[in-house]
Amino acid sequence: MSAHEDPPATADPAAEIRWPKRVTKERLRRLYLSEAAGLLDEELLDEVGITLYLRCQAILDIERAQSEGLVRCPRCQQAGRDTWLRRGHASREQPEPQLICGICGWALSWREYAASYRRRQLNLGGAGAYFSAYVDAYPRLRSARDKMLAVDRLIHAFHYSLRSDPTLPPARRRST
């Protein structure tokens, strides 16, 4: 399949949406231990850094979908195109807003799209600026040192943003 061909359509358009997995605590622990020992595992660093990049990008995409009604077409994206779909409006004929790609034909209701990311911990929270900064910077980083610093900054910034987030239940919120 060339970069301009669409991936084959599936019977279930929601199945074409693939959200990146979380970085496990164990991987982070191994990464930090290797760095602290002076033997940075650069392969693990790349795995963690890219996984974080993909998670941050997904979180930003979901925020854009919620705030602007713009959704990145999962089929076109897999084919190497950056196609954005605008959430349709409900009407008498079409009571459920739809997402329809005019390029590849992928279509899904807004409700089904929103269900695809529910309970996957892909929330912007108070860390949106940190996610954006990481997504902007990470692809340009070349040295292992710079990548490790970027990962470390993101992890610390994310955890710091949780400390005073008023939307969290009191048991998860810490005062600064």
Image (cartoon, helix red, strand yellow):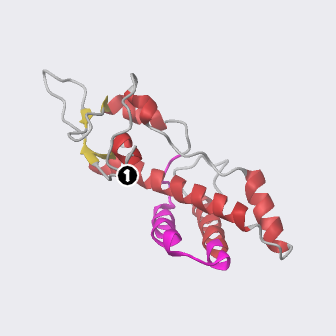
Mark 1: few/some/many CA within 10 Å (<14, 14-19, 20+): few
Please provide percent x and percent y for residue 117.
47, 38
What residue sits 83% from the left and 66% below the top?
33
Asked if one can make out residue 166 in the rendered structure from this viewpoint, the answer is: no
Going by the image, does 24 lie left or right of 67?
right
Q: Nearer the viewer, residue 109 or 3?
A: 3
Please tell me whether residue 141 is drawn above or below residue 175 in the rendered image.
Answer: below
Q: Is residue 113 left or right of residue 145?
A: left
Q: Which amino acid is tagged 1?
A: Gly
Name the residue: 57% across, 49% down.
Answer: 168
In-image side of 88 versus 55 (left or right): left
Q: Which residues are magenta?
A: 122-147
In the rendered view, would you say 171 is above or below 36?
Answer: above
Relative to the observer, which residue lies in front, 127 or 148? Answer: 148
Q: Magenta stretch containing residue 125, yes or no?
A: yes
- Residue tagged 1: 80
Figure check: 43 above or below 9: below
Report x, y in % for residue 92.
13, 22
Q: Is residue 138 left or right of residue 172?
A: left
Q: Is residue 32 magenta?
A: no
Q: Judging from the image, what secondary structure is the residue with disc 1 in?
A: loop
> Which is more toward the observer, 51 or 113?
51
Q: Quadrant of residue 121?
A: top right
Locate the C terminus and report the quarter of the image it occupies: bottom right
Q: Quadrant of residue 46?
A: bottom right
* Relative image position of residue 133 (x, y in whole percent): 48, 70
Which quadrant of the rendered structure holds the N terminus?
A: top left
